[in-house]
Image (cartoon, rainbow, N blue to C red):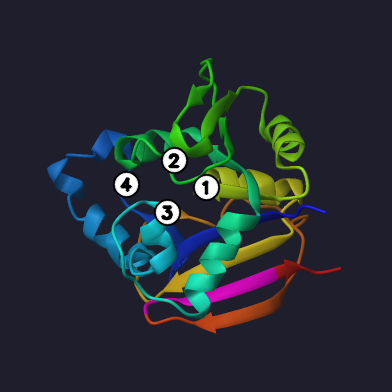
């Protein structure tokens, strides 16, 4: 049976992305520090052997429990869901062989034909809301998992729907003071979670929470 999960980076004060991290502010002098902030948040992943292999960044990299965790996530994920903002930002920096290697369902109001990339990644643009995106992702994933990739608004929609079964959070020791906050605009109906595991990484602590029964 497949699971619906989120696997994200988070700052100590609860932000998934720093202030100014958007296509509109890509070269805005007022927000030029967003890149350094995001690097501090997600720098741990660039050190991993599996991540370097997956993005063809060259040989080497850290092995061990965190690397094993990321490899399992890649191998067990059969479909991804993301928001249009994350897609727009990622499309600027992802290589032609995009790092997902699965169908990716993009929540958007824009009508657009599927965009096929190398390595098994095809982006599908869903105009009918998160429930429809999840339905399509379930069909595509089969027995493999469905990852809600982000950004914060997209994750909030699926938290409100109560369909996320596991939250995997890489908590980095950085403080943003502003940006895109994860736990915002969610209702009391959001499921409760319980601790499943914790891995002490060199640059982040990797926390797994399973939905409480």
Q: Pointers 3 and 4 in contact (CB under 8 A)? A: no
Q: Residue furthest front?
A: 59
Give the prevailing secondary structure in the magenta stretch.
strand
* Distance CA(mark 2)–CA(mark 4): 10 Å
Residue holding disc 4: 21
Between discs 2 and 3, the one toward the N terminus: 3
Label 2: element kind: helix
Is 107 positioned to the left or the right of 99 in the image? right
Magenta region, residue range = 203-209
Between discs 4 and 1, the one toward the N terminus: 4
Residue holding disc 2: 86
Q: Nearer the viewer, mark 4 or mark 1?
A: 1
* Distance CA(mark 4)–CA(mark 1): 13 Å
Between discs 3 and 4, the one toward the N terminus: 4
Q: Nearer the viewer, mark 2 or mark 4?
A: 2
Residue holding disc 1: 150
Q: Is residue 176 visible?
A: no
Q: Nearer the viewer, mark 3 or mark 4?
A: 3
45 relative to 57, above or below: below
* Distance CA(mark 3)–CA(mark 4): 24 Å
Q: Pointers 2 and 4 in contact (CB under 8 A)? A: no
Residue holding disc 3: 54
202 relative to 24, above or below: below
Is 163 positioned to the left or the right of 69 in the image? right
Label 1: element kind: strand
Q: In which quarter of the view is residue 89 placed?
A: top left
Between discs 1 and 2, the one toward the N terminus: 2
Residues packed near mark 4 inside 10 Å, few (<14), some (14 to 19) or many (20 plus): many
């Amino acid at each position: 049976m497949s699971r619906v999960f989120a696997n994200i980076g988070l700052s100590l004060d609860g932000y998934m992305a720093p202030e100014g991290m958007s296509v509109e502010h890509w070269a805005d002098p007022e927000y030029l520090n967003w890149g350094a902030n995001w690097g501090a948040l997600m720098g741990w992943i660039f050190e991993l052997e599996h991540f370097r292999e997956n993005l063809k960044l060259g040989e080497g990299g850290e092995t061990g429990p965190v690397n094993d965790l990321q490899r399992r996530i890649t191998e067990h994920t059969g479909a991804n869901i993301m928001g249009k903002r994350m897609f727009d930002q990622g499309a600027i920096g992802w290589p032609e062989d995009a790092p997902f290697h699965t169908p990716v369902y993009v929540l958007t109001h824009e009508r657009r034909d599927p965009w096929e990339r190398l390595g098994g990644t095809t982006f599908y643009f869903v105009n009918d809301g998160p429930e429809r995106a999840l339905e399509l992702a379930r069909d595509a994933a089969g027995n493999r998992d469905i990852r809600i990739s982000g950004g914060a608004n997209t994750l909030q929609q699926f938290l409100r729907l109560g369909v996320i079964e596991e939250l995997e959070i890489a908590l980095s020791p950085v403080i943003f003071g502003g940006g895109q906050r994860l736990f915002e605009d969610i209702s009391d109906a959001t499921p409760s979670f319980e601790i499943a595991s914790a891995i002490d990484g060199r640059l982040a602590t990797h926390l797994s929470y399973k939905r409480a029964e």
